[in-house]
Image (tube, rainbow, N blue to C red):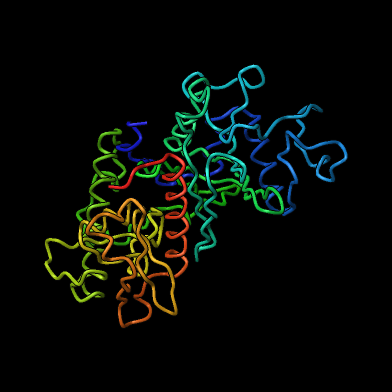
Amino acid sequence: MDGIASSVPLIARPSFDRACSFVPSEYVQAWEWFLREEQRGGLWDKLPHRTNADSPQYGHRLTIDSELFPVSRDSGIFWPGRGRVKHPHEKTFALSVHNSKRGAYPDVPPLYLEDGTWVLKYSSQSASVENWRDQDYNQKMINCMECGVPVGVFFATSAGYKVLGLAFVERYEPENSWFVLHGPVHKGGPDARFFPDMSYMKDAPIAAEFSGAPTNDEEKVRYALRRERIGQQRFRNQLFEAYTGRCAVSGCSVDEALEAAHIENYSGPKSQVVSNGILLRRDLHSLFDAHLISFELVRGDYQLCGSYLLQHTDYATFAGSVLREPDEHRLRPNARFLEAHRAEFDFSESRRHAEAVAPY
């Protein structure tokens, strides 16, 4: 999995229609099934491949040429084998993912965004799972990420499995071994909701990418990195102004020690806005990104909560510290993003406990 950490997603305008050219026809029919189930909105007592004949969902399973076609399997990341589907020689793609409350991976609920989309953090296949290498599940998710191919998403709730629909594998977060899924994806496209927000490039020199000149992958990577640097600098300047040049936790006012922390690392439109950021001292930023610290709402204030890993360190003194928010309400941290970060913090804590990670 080391190679994922440095990969740069290059698909700037992914779409359902574009993805159809990369996959077998059975995948397209399965995607249409996910779209129908998303619209129908019913809950599945069990995943489709385990649904019994006496279940009201039985008739909603996917059939292709009068034969049952699986859209799920017990493995969280699923792809139909070569005995059932003729996959392209170059790449094999994941077809669907699902979580399970009885599984080894705790749940992190989807984060619903103001633009009508949602983001779901999904654990990569762990090396501790028996036979995990046999089908190389993670590589199939990476293939989806690199080519802009969507996956179907089931999410387990206390009442049953909900079909969220289709999602793009937007990126991989190595610090917590998560694939970031962004949906819902529908037919047509490209969908503007999945475009990168490039408004901060308006004053940048026009590059070959905008002139219609052909570019190779190396040039695309350089451009993606340059675009990210420009956006990050703008984001940092705005947070410095909103937080009057002081860390929101420690009060540190040394410019060189301060960094712009994203609350939700979602990389599409609206991610580089002040309400999705906190100005933090560099070390606190690192802990925040690693989900070793987070914030919980206590009597109207957001207070810092820290991992048990930090209990014997100097950082334990920050526990309970109140997050200093900007005076202007529109510049304050987005409450939904803070709640989602706290859910991810809890997810990480449960994983650390399960793996018996020792405190520092």
Residue in the foreground of this view, choosing between 110 and 228: 110
Residue in the foreground of this view, choosing between 342 and 168: 342
Task: Give the farthest residue toward the right.
Answer: 54
Q: In this view, does 94 lie to the left or right of 289?
A: right
Q: Position of residue 112 (x, y in %)?
A: 53, 61
Q: Residue at x 51, y 29 (%)?
A: 129
Q: Where is residue 194 in the image (x, y as percent from the top left)?
A: 46, 52
Q: In this view, does 321 lie to the left or right of 19?
A: left
Q: Where is residue 309 in the image (x, y as percent from the top left)?
A: 33, 50
Residue in the foreground of this view, choosing between 229 and 209: 229
Q: Is residue 170 visible?
A: no
Q: Position of residue 62 (x, y in %)?
A: 75, 36
Relative to 56, does residue 288 appear above or below in the rendering?
Answer: below
Q: Is residue 58 left or right of residue 358?
A: right
Q: Which quarter of the figure has residue 82?
A: top right
Q: In this view, does 337 lie to the left or right of 36?
A: left
Q: Which quarter of the figure has residue 178?
A: top left
Q: Which residue is drawn at 43% across and 50% down?
A: 349
Look at the image and tell me in which quarter the N terminus lies: top left
Query: How many numbered discs, if any?
Result: 0
Q: Is residue 15 visible?
A: yes
